[in-house]
Amino acid sequence: MKLKQFSMGIGDRFGRQGTAQLNAFVMAKSQGVAITPVWNKSFREHQIVGTVPDAVRTEADGAVQAAGWTDPYFVDADHVGFDNVDGFIGASDFFTLDVADAIGEAADPEAIESFVTNHKSLIGSIDVDGIEGPVHISRDFLVHCAEKYLFAVREAGRIYRKISARKNSGTVIEVSMDETDSPQTPEELLVILAAIRSEGIPADTIAPKFSGRFNKGVDYVGDVRLFRREFDMDLAVIRHAVRHFGMQASLKLSVHSGSDKFKLYPEIRAALRTFDAGVHLKTAGTTWLEELIGLAESGREGLDVARQVYARAYQRFDELAKPYATVIDIDPEQLPGPDAVQQWNGTAYASALRHDQGNPAYNMHFRQLLHVAYKIAAEMGDDYSGALENNRDIVARHVTDNLFKRHITPLFLSV
């Protein structure tokens, strides 16, 4: 199986919505757009929920069988490193190599000098189709980039070789470079891609850093025009690397925390058409939030469970928010108290949580807290899973509608 031009990472915290998720891709295919589904779950999420990578494979395979899906699909070992990738290798065929912690750590001087010597062709002015004016790279800048990124790329190579020793075909490799302080310039991305090629990593996708805030489960915060400029330049650099570095023709951008970035979807869609390019959009906790919305609207039992999740999350705000501090912006003063939420009916709860910015009841702080509160539901055990089972039809409808109407349609189907 090969990754198609368009693909989406679909997280599912509790592994119960695979068929509902896949139905959104079936609907897109019926309208003439092929999108590859990629079920993704990170090491951290497995630890919190108490699952294992094999469970994601079972969910994906079961959904594919139930839907009669014959197109490609993948299971992503999301944000893995050298020390935790082993448990994913058997079940996964997509690997997001997370080397963020290695960015800025300098490789040994001999490796840097060797890289600079072997990539002298990058020094000078480079015409990149799609970028106005030449891209300039000096020797000093090349050395600077090698000092900043070479160790991280070599770490990605180390992870890749560990994977390929046990899985030598049929895998998709993503290199994650998005967790840095500032976006990569076109010059930096050119050097990074050259290093990836030199390291022998057959990258299918790369996740660079973009300007603005990509907070979990809420809309983009930042300058949309600046994002579009960066996105266009990244697409141009990738096309150049494919043509001149011998990288895989399938190489494409990956946008992390891409769920609910509604302001950006028209810009991404227009850029993809301009460059005839592909994209991998990673979504995650959106599905879990749709479960809560479905439960809230299902009736008394489901609403009680949804209220309990929030009440416990509110009391454990610091604990739940800390691991996600860099990707959430929650003002505690804007959070409703648990006593108030206890009085809400299903419509009020769903209205506060559903990402509908046209609804005055929508509360982005409420939504972000619940986004990181899936640990609470995991601790509830059968109380939560039983509620999902008892209300699976309404929950599934919300999951499918969210993916298809709010994500796939504006990004891939809108005229």
Image (cartoon, grey):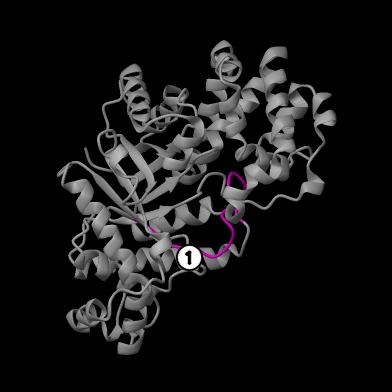
Whether residue 217 appears in this view of the structure is yes
Q: Position of residue 57 (x, y in %)?
A: 33, 29
Task: Give the quarter of the image for residue 85.
Answer: top left
Q: Residue furthest top?
A: 390
Image height of 56 relative to 259, above or below: above
Image height of 36 relative to 214, above or below: above
User: What secondary structure predominates along the stretch shown in magenta?
Assistant: loop
Q: Please name whichever residue, 234 or 123, is drawn nearer the observer in this view of the structure.
A: 123
Task: Give the quarter of the image for residue 214.
Answer: bottom right
Question: Horizontally, is 147 left or right of 290 in the view?
Answer: left
Q: Position of residue 130 (x, y in %)?
A: 36, 71
Q: Kindly identify the amino acid type of the residue bearing the numbered disc 1.
A: Thr
Magenta stretch: includes residue 212:
yes
Residues drawn in magenta = 206-220
Question: Horizontally, is 162 left or right of 18 in the view?
Answer: left
Give the class, few, some or many, for how many residues have Cα within 10 Å of label 1's Cα (few <14, many ≥20).
Answer: some
Q: Residue at x 74, y 28 (%)?
A: 349
Q: Count how many numbered circles sit on residues in the image.
A: 1
Q: Residue at x 48, y 42 (%)?
A: 283
Magenta stretch: includes residue 374:
no
Task: Give the quarter of the image for residue 310.
Answer: top right
Q: Residue at x 36, y 32 (%)?
A: 29
Q: Position of residue 45 (x, y in %)?
A: 48, 38
Looking at the rendered image, the quarter that the N terminus falls into is top left
Q: Give the labeled residue for mark 1.
A: 180
Question: Horizontally, is 243 left or right of 20 in the view?
Answer: left
